[in-house]
Image (tube, grey):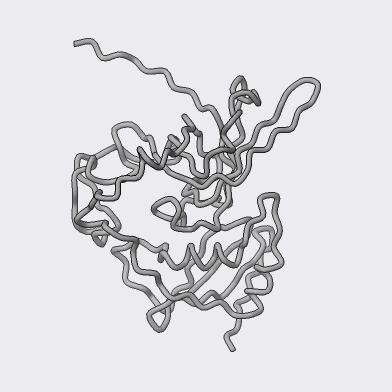
Amino acid sequence: MNTPVLSIEPVAITHSCFSDKFGIPRQPLLADASRASLELLSPYNDPEAVAGLEQYTHLWLTWQFHQVAGQWCAKVRPPRLGGNKKMGVFATRSPFRPNNIGLSVVRLIEVRVSKTAASAKVEIIIAGADLLDGTPILDIKPYIPYADNVPEAASDFADAAPAATPVAIPEAIADAARNYRDQWGTDLLALIQQVLAQDPKPAYQQPDPSRIYGMELCGFNLQWRYRDNGIYVVALTPLELSVTVEGKGE
């Protein structure tokens, strides 16, 4: 049997608050405060292509794991099973797949269209995305509640969102986060809470109270420690600064 050769090209590129793979929520909508912009690429940046999209509250995105290194395996280690137990790749959402394609449902915030004499810029602003900055978007479809919501659906090992990890943020760092502004209206303080509540470290690792963990978020270096069965934020430093000062608890 001849296998057809598929030719797929991105329809949009992602501009995201997540510039590093570490710390991105493991599923969409777990951090609803996250923001991203899907910029349609030529020739798909036609305002007619998004006509009517604002009638929907949520979207399905098909996208590419463009920074996954390594080959696919028949069995993988899902984080929800502690990172040490294996399951078949098709029974998980592992990025190490035969075809490195991801699927996410996100919340639609706004469709922005700006025209010039020569071209048009079409952006779709979304919330709750689990997408790395620069992620190629392969397709965009509306979420249809009566067809896509299956109330009786079940999963034996991932039937509910993981329990949230307590997060403590010193007031000085919280104030800095409250003062953050970007073009998407991101609530940085809420985003920090939601991202860290998912416990970004690998599931198989035990928390090391002596270690400072960090990730890039919205142009900042966010750092934290594990203590008292929770997470304590110690710094929120602009990436262009080379010196990090730990926040002090009260």
Write the residue at 68% across / 74% down.
175
Q: In x, y percent, where is residue 247?
A: 61, 79
Left or right: where does residue 128 sit relative to residue 245? left
Q: In x, y percent, where is residue 109?
A: 59, 46
Residue, far front: 146
Left or right: where does residue 145 sit relative to residue 72? right
Is 28 or 234 nearer to us in this picture?
Answer: 28
Write the residue at 55% across / 62% down.
191
Q: In x, y percent, where is residue 181?
A: 71, 58
Q: Where's the C terminus, which quadrant? A: bottom right
Write the residue at 59% across / 62% down.
221
Q: Residue 171 falls in which quadrant of the image?
A: bottom right
Write the residue at 60% across / 43% down.
125
Q: In x, y percent, where is residue 150?
A: 30, 45
Above or below for 21 versus 250? above
Above or below for 77 versus 144? below
Above or below for 242 versus 95? below
**How many numbered discs sit on the rendered protein?**
0
Residue, far bottom: 250
